[in-house]
Image (cartoon, rainbow, N blue to C red):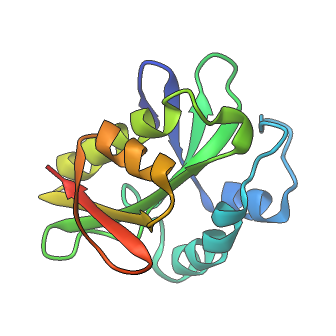
């Protein structure tokens, strides 16, 4: 089921959609931004497809396309790394270059956090490269706080 925010729709990906995105071949009803999909999304789709085939639809803890309500274009993606483990749901997110800088990522992330809490998670975690200040700001904008960092990553959790 789609989740709607003020400006976005989080659309859970089905198997056929995931395969089309991975192949970079939109179907007749697909509406994609000119720079969709983005590289990180293409990296996780093979794992998502394999898990979907083996275990079935992971919803609500699967992958979501992020679409703008204004024009319906897919402009990014957000995904959980499976159902919560000990109450903790982990996720990742990203937008195409043309959609960045408008607060869409924080809006989508906040919606995903609500999805996780509504489905049994007690907290949500995510990480980003230490020098990815835009992602850090996005996570803070969605109500997450940084808990620690190492040489490579900064780690965030819902407050």
Q: Residue at x 27, y 65 (%)?
A: 89
Relative image position of residue 39 (x, y in whole percent): 72, 63
Q: Position of residue 16 (x, y in %)?
A: 70, 59
Q: Nearer the viewer, residue 68 or 52?
A: 68
Residue 59 on image: x %, y %:
41, 58
- Direction from residue 104 to residue 44 in the image, left or right: right
- Horizontally, is 53 left or right of 157 in the view? right
Q: Does 53 sit above or below residue 65?
A: below
- Above or below residue 16? Residue 2 is above
Does residue 132 show up?
yes
Q: Is residue 89 left or right of residue 101?
A: left
Vertical relation: 102 (above or below) 16: above
The quarter of the image holding the N terminus is top left
Q: Is 5 situated above or below 100?
A: above
| Towards the viewer: 53 or 43 | 43
Q: Could you tell me which residue is drawn at 72 percent across and 55 percent down? A: 38
At a point 64% along the width and 69% down the height, the residue shown is: 45
Horizontal side of residue 47 vs 138, given as left or right: right
Q: How many marks?
A: 0
Camera-side residue of 123 and 117: 123
């Amino acid at each position: 089921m789609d989740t709607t925010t003020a400006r976005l729709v989080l659309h859970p990906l089905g198997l056929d959609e995931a395969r089309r995105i991975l192949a970079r071949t939109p179907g007749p009803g697909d509406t994609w931004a000119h720079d969709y999909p983005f590289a990180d999304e293409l990296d996780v789709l093979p794992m998502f497809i394999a898990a979907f085939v083996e275990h079935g639809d992971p919803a609500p803890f699967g992958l979501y396309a992020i679409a703008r309500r204004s024009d319906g274009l897919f402009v990014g993606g957000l995904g959980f790394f499976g159902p919560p483990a000990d109450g903790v749901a982990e996720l990742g997110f990203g937008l195409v270059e043309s959609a960045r800088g408008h607060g869409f990522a924080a809006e989508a992330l906040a919606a995903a956090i609500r999805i996780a809490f509504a489905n049994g998670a007690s907290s949500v975690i995510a990480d980003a490269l230490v020098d990815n200040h835009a992602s850090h700001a996005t996570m803070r904008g969605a109500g997450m706080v940084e808990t620690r960092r190492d040489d490579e990553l900064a780690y965030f959790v819902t407050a």
